[in-house]
Amino acid sequence: MAEFNVQKKRERINVFKIGKGYVLKYFFDDKEIFKSLVDYYNSQTYQFEMKSVGARNKVMKYLEMKAGFDVYIVEDPTDFMVKVSKDKKYSAILKNSVDYQETKDLRIFIMKDMAAVEEAISLGAEKYEG
């Protein structure tokens, strides 16, 4: 019988450049992975924050080499941005965002991945084009 060497599909994690640092939002089922990254975890925002390129590279290398993820740097978050008017409920959208800003009339979110963008749209958000 023929043997097939089928590689398991690696899960994608986006690391966003926000301001001068980098942010990723992901729930790690494996406690060892979380423990390895706990120094970067912000419990207020439920995300991992890296303040330097060196820290970002260290986290990315760990996630790719040891934890088996595909990690992508997102320098331009336009494709991940959605908006809602200020009078709409937004807590379900906020939980899957890595950053948000408010204007006079809108709340603008950067979502953690494309699935979160689609979910936000299903909850009443619209794509934000800038």
Image (tube, grey):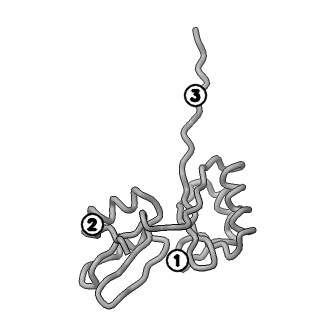
Q: Quadrant of the N terminus?
A: top right
What's the amino acid at mark 2?
A: Leu
Instruction: Estimate how packed mark 1 is, as few (under 14), some (14 to 19) or many (20 or more) residues with alpha carbons within 10 Å.
Output: some
Rendered location of residue 36, percent (x, y):
71, 61
The numbered disc on residue 6 is: 3
Tell us which disc is closer to us: 1 or 2.
2
| Res 40 → quadrant | bottom right
Count all numbered tags in the image, as a single digit: 3
| Res 87 → quadrant | bottom left
> Between marks 3 and 1, how big is the CA–CA gap?
37 Å
What's the amino acid at mark 3?
A: Val
Rendered location of residue 4, percent (x, y):
58, 20
Under circle 3, the secondary element is loop
Q: Quadrant of the C terminus?
A: bottom left
User: Would you say the residues marked 2 and 3 are in contact, meaning their CB atoms lie under 8 Å apart?
Assistant: no
Q: Nearer the viewer, residue 119 or 52?
A: 52
Under circle 1, the secondary element is loop
Q: Nearer the viewer, residue 120 or 45?
A: 120
> Between marks 2 and 3, how big is the CA–CA gap?
37 Å
The numbered disc on residue 71 is: none
The numbered disc on residue 45 is: 1
Among numbered discs 1 and 2, the one appearing first in the sequence: 1
Query: On the image, numbered disc 2 is attached to which residue?
Result: 123
Rendered location of residue 16, percent (x, y):
55, 67
